Amino acid sequence: MKYKILKLVCLSLLMFVVTVTSAQVVYEFSPTDSDITSSVRQAIENTSDKHIKLVFNKGVYRFDPKYAFERFSFITNHGNGYKKVIFRFENFESVEVEGNDSEFVFHGQVAPFQFEKCKNINVQNIALDWDIPFIFEAKVKAVNEVEGWMDVNPLTKGFSWKLKGNHISFPNIGGFSYHELGHTHNFNAETKSTAHGAKGLHLNPERVEKLKNGAYRFYQKLKSYPQVGTIIASKGEKGTNRYAPAFQTQNCKDVVFDKVIVHHALGMGFLFERTENIQILNSGVYTKDGSDKYISSTADATHFANCKGDVLIENCRIESMLDDGTNVHGTYVEVDRIINDYTVRVALKHFEQAGFEFAGIGDEVWFIQSPSPKRGHVNTVSEVTQINETYSDLKFENKIPHNLVLGDVLENKTWNPYFTMRGCKITKHRARNMMIKTPKKIIIENNYLSSEMSSIGLRGETVNWYESGAVEDVVIRNNHFFNCAHGGAEHAVLWVSPKLNKSFDKTELYDRNIIFEGNLIETFDNRIVWADRLDGLVFKGNTIKQTNGVKQLFPKAPLFDFENCNDINIIENVYQGKATNFFETDEKTSVTLKVKKNKGFSYKK
């Protein structure tokens, strides 16, 4: 293949090598102690070809916001606004980023990677981190619940914070600071896992006092206090503590991340919006081994909003984030106005969904009309008019339902993925291992899972985030669940719990067809399955073993709790433990409930 090599001088006076082939333009970078943001920006912006490859020779690369590309960004589940973007790819037919096991170190408020309207994205062999994390961490030394204070020793090495007046501010970088500690979680200092029985905190002390022994006393009345010896980690106040994900893709197709590690992010690790066919392989979101950092991404490790095609997460290590390991969902929008027989105005209901693209021309949409939560009438979008970041007008090919009313919701039928998670380890973090909401096939197999809340949550809802939708085909098999639901709130290994607003029937079946088989569940507590409005569960061939060493949090809870369910089958399972309360069911569920050939527990109507 013919090619030519060019040497260009970048804006930052650094050198990189450009190889032009018949297939793509290849930019080759070498390590340097200087910021190379300008070099990367010039390479991408000067490329007129639709195919680009960036190759980084093995080493450490540094990126600062000073010369970053700046653009207003709509980022679902984050804060919209002008973002400093380091790698900005748009309208490419192929994008390759080869890191050769390099480390990318970012400074300050930056969005590392944005991909929009790109195809054939391949990123591999890179680890991302921040020189100074946007986190405050401290070890709890003393607590006085009566007087309302706790003493802490803040971690200093690698962190940036200061006591100003009576308050702690952090990270104080580039003119930005959090002015309250905000959302806070606490961790076991030895295992780095979320602390057993701990509840989330919101810290905004009335005053902070530095003591003679070097500790800092936080004066704040709390409903619950962290245990002495644990590590508290704070990420700042709501509304500003989700700047941007490490990787964001919008309206892209055929995306592969292989051997890509996110050690820290100012939001989610990986975020995908309206993207088709995604693979995250041999990758991870976790803090660097041996570091004092307890937080990787400050929100979900991986998040998929209105994606389609095949989504695969395989052989990944996911730890230390402050939200779910993965969240897969569609989006409900609410009918705000009926304009004519073919057109409705819809509203995005959560402030962090503002600007999200719910539907495009040609998309099929379900109309869900209260009081039934069932997916009903299907129509195809023929025209979209965006009013602003909250409201859009959708025109359809056929007439809308004649009985549609304000407050009914719409769900995008076209943009739902097949989802597989296989061979992953998800531990040491806040919230659920997985929140999955797609009507397409879901396979969760051969994973090691340990969670603070429920391990696997299935919850479509029209109350807060307006995340759709009801599942219809789920297989959960050959996983190892270990001490799940160890936080202070009551959860279960498998938690099926739709949360719909008052206009919807609270008894009508919602989720369907779950097979939970061949799993090993080692648990300190009782709750295994807690389900509401579930139609069809086969819980078969699982082994449940009670562990020792940590205190039961809800010893009176049942192993199985069902309400308003149908066709529940508990078959050929083994239980080894001390529980005596095995089932709690309502009359509706008990009519079709089948419990047979189990060892260690029984069911009596």
Image (spheres, grey):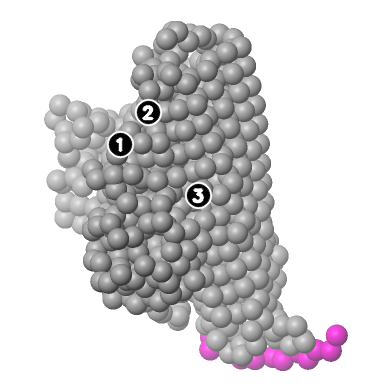
Q: Is residue 154 visible?
A: no
Q: Residues within 10 Å of mark 1 (few under 14, many from 20)?
A: some
Element on which disc 2 rests: loop
**Among the 4 quarters of the image, the one containing residue 475:** top right
For badge 1, the amino acid type reads Lys
Q: Are marks 2 and 3 in contact (CB under 8 Å)?
A: no
Q: Position of residue 267 (x, y in %)?
A: 42, 58
Label for residue 564? Answer: 2
| Mark earlier in primary sequence (2, 3) | 3
Q: Nearer the viewer, residue 581 or 25?
A: 581
Residue 12 against residue 540 in the figure, above or below: below
**Spatial CA span between label 2 and label 1:** 9 Å
Q: Of tags 3 and 1, which is closer to the observer?
A: 1
- Is residue 464 shown above or below 428? below
Residue 519, given in percent of the width and then of the height, sits at 61, 27
Horizontally, is 591 left or right of 19 in the view? left
Q: Residue at x 37, y 56 (%)?
A: 367
Q: Which residues are magenta?
A: 1-14
Q: Residue at x 45, y 79 (%)?
A: 68
Element type at mark 1: loop
Identified by mark 3, the residue type is Thr
Residue 438: image tag: 3
Residue 10 magenta? yes
Q: Residue at x 19, y 45 (%)?
A: 205
Badge 3 element: loop
The three-letter amino acid code for the residue at tag 2 is: Asn
Q: Earlier in the sequence, mark 3 or mark 1?
A: 3
* Disc 1 target residue: 506
Q: Nearer the viewer, residue 126 or 502?
A: 502
